Amino acid sequence: MKILIVEDENDIAVPLKNSLEKKGFAVDVAPEGKSALESIRKNNYDCILLDLNLPEVDGLRVSQIIRKEKNTTPVIMLTARSQIYDKLEGFDSGADDYVTKPFDLPELIARINAVIKRNSLNKLLSLRFDNFELFPDRNLVKKYKGGKVIAEIELSNKETGILEYLLRNSKKIISTEELLEHVWDSEIDLFTDTLKTHIKTLRKKIDPNKNIILTIRGKGYRISSH
């Protein structure tokens, strides 16, 4: 899943980016509201972590603008202010959740996952497909036979991100560009073969016969409905 952190304080933004990347998220950072709007219009994010106190264009205004532009990406407001009127103002601007600094990282990650799932077509914590079940928070796939677990398969962060995104959008074909945008940060070269490489290793682990992750020639990938 791809996150945008909008934060002007490097001592907050950089450690947060590093921590989220260790948890498997792809992360971009914008230091102020104007560049944040440019990134939001250019990229597809699964969640935006938006500081209220930003130079030039503040967080409330950023949230108001993207909602006016019909962007439904979940927004979590990050702020040192804890007064109830600030929270209400944040929600009125279109925010989905609110975290007061200093925040607990596990709690923030739980809130990120919660708003992403609420915005997803598939809102389940674990995702069943074929004879498997994906547990995104553990980078783990369980294989079943006769109702019993017969294998546990560990995935990398990127393999988990690819599989989770395909499963949560299983009713549509996902293009290579869309997968790259949601699983990698904005520095990724859209012409790279890295996605094909990760799809190949993912198939070796769970789909050697290519019956689950289908390649739709000229369009992208989708999960088999069977």
Image (cartoon, helix red, strand yellow):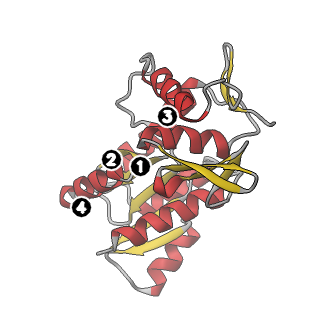
Residue 226 at x, y percent in the picture: 81, 36
Q: Which residue corresponds to the image point at 47% horizontal and 56% vertical from the top-left?
A: 138
Identify the residue under disc 1: 4
Is 189 in front, or is 205? 205
In the rendered structure, which disc, 2 or 4, sits on the residue that comes first in sequence?
4
The mark found on residue 29 in the picture is 2
Pick the residue in front: 180 or 56.
Answer: 180
CA gap between label 2 and label 1 equals 6 Å
Q: Amino acid at mark 3?
A: Glu
Query: Amino acid type of disc 1?
Result: Leu
For mark 4, give the secondary structure. Answer: helix
How far is the residue under mark 2 from the one under mark 3? 14 Å
How far across and how far down the image is residue 129, in percent?
71, 45
Q: Taking 79 as reference, is 17 above or below it?
A: above
Q: Which residue is mark 3?
A: 181
Residue at 62 percent across and 31 percent down: it is: 207
164 or 147: which is nearer to us? Answer: 147
Instruction: Identify residue for label 4.
Output: 12
Q: Along the line of sight, which residue is nearer the eye, 185 or 82?
A: 185
